[in-house]
Amino acid sequence: MIKNLRRAALAAALVALPLLAPTPARAHDRAAETYTLPIAAAVEILPLAAEARSGYQRTSFKHWNAGQNPTDGCNTRAEVLLSEAIDPPEVLPGCKLSGGRWWSYYDAKWVTTASALDVDHMVPLAEAWDSGASQWTAQRREAYANDLDARTSLVAVSAASNRSKADQDPAEWLPPAVDVTCRYTSEWLATKLRWELTIDAVELEALTQLAEACPGTTVTYDPAP
C-alpha cells in the first residue's frame, strides 16, 4: 500500500512540475534529465526501507580516485576544493594546493588552508551502504564516492563540522549554522534521489518535519547514470 502511494505521488509530482534544462556539471556538460520538486514531494517519493549496516567497510567505496582529468595529478578531493574555492589556491606540482579561501557553509566559517577542509559526502558512505549501496557493484560505489557530476554530492567544509556529522542522517545531525537547514535538507534529498537510495522510518519522520519548516524550498536532481 505504501509503495503504491509513493509511486502515485511520484507520478503526480512529475506531471505537475516541468522538466528543466540540465544544470552544469562541475567539469563538463552531461546530457541528463533534471527534475525539480517541492521539498515535501521529494520526501514523499523516497522509498521507505529498514537500514542494514551489516558488512560495511569504508574501503567498499574506492575514493579518492583520479577525478575527471586523470592526467593533471588532481584527485577527486582536490577537484572539489578547486571548484568550490572562493579565492582560488595556487596549484603546485603534484596538485598540492597553496593558499586559497573557502566558505564552509555547514558552520558559516572561512577556511584558508586546504588541509583544514574535508570533502564531505552529502549522504555519508555508511549511510549510503545502509540505504541500498550494499547491493551495488564496486564500480557503482566508486562512482558514488567520487561523484563530480552533481555539485551537491560532495561538499568542501571545515574538518570539524564534517567530523561532527560523521555518518549521521538528518534525524541525528544538522549543520550548526541553522540558517542553512533548508539548503542542507534539499541537498540531502537530492543526493538520495539521484542515487535511488532509501530512507528509514526515523529519517522519514525527521525529513517530513524539516520539509514542513521549509515550505518554499525545492529539490533539484538528475538521476545518476
Image (cartoon, rainbow, N blue to C red):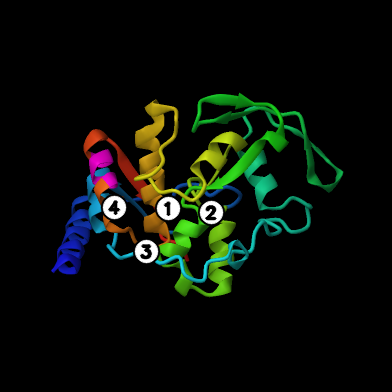
Q: Are marks 1 and 3 in contact (CB under 8 Å)?
A: no
Number of residues whose C-alpha sits closer than 10 Å to that of mark 2, classed few (under 14), some (14–19) or many (20 or more): many
Residue 202, numbered circle: 4
Query: Residue 195's spot in the image, x, y percent?
Result: 43, 61
The region drawn magenta spans 206-211
Q: Secondary structure at mark 1?
A: helix
What predominant SS class does the magenta segment belong to? helix
Residue at 51 percent across and 25 percent down: it is 108
Q: Is residue 206 above or below residue 135?
A: above
The mark closer to the camera, 1 or 2, is 1
User: To which residue does mark 1 refer?
Assistant: 191
> Based on the displayed image, in which of its 4 quarters is residue 143 positioned?
bottom right
Upstream in sequence: badge 1 or badge 3: 3
Image-based side of 42 in relation to 79, left or right: left
User: To which residue does mark 2 refer?
Assistant: 149
In space, the residues marked 3 and 2 are separated at their CA atoms by: 26 Å
Q: Are marks 1 and 2 in contact (CB under 8 Å)?
A: no
In space, the residues marked 1 and 4 are separated at their CA atoms by: 18 Å
User: To which residue does mark 3 refer?
Assistant: 51
> Based on the displayed image, in which of its 4 quarters is residue 158 positioned?
top right
Residue at 86 percent across and 44 percent down: it is 93
Upstream in sequence: badge 3 or badge 4: 3
The mark closer to the camera, 4 or 2, is 4
In space, the residues marked 1 and 3 are separated at their CA atoms by: 17 Å
The mark closer to the camera, 1 or 3, is 3
Q: Is residue 104 above or below residue 210?
A: above
Q: Are marks 1 and 4 in contact (CB under 8 Å)?
A: no
Q: Are marks 4 and 2 in contact (CB under 8 Å)?
A: no
Q: Secondary structure at mark 4?
A: helix
Number of residues whose C-alpha sits closer than 10 Å to that of mark 3, classed few (under 14), some (14–19) or many (20 or more): some
Upstream in sequence: badge 1 or badge 4: 1
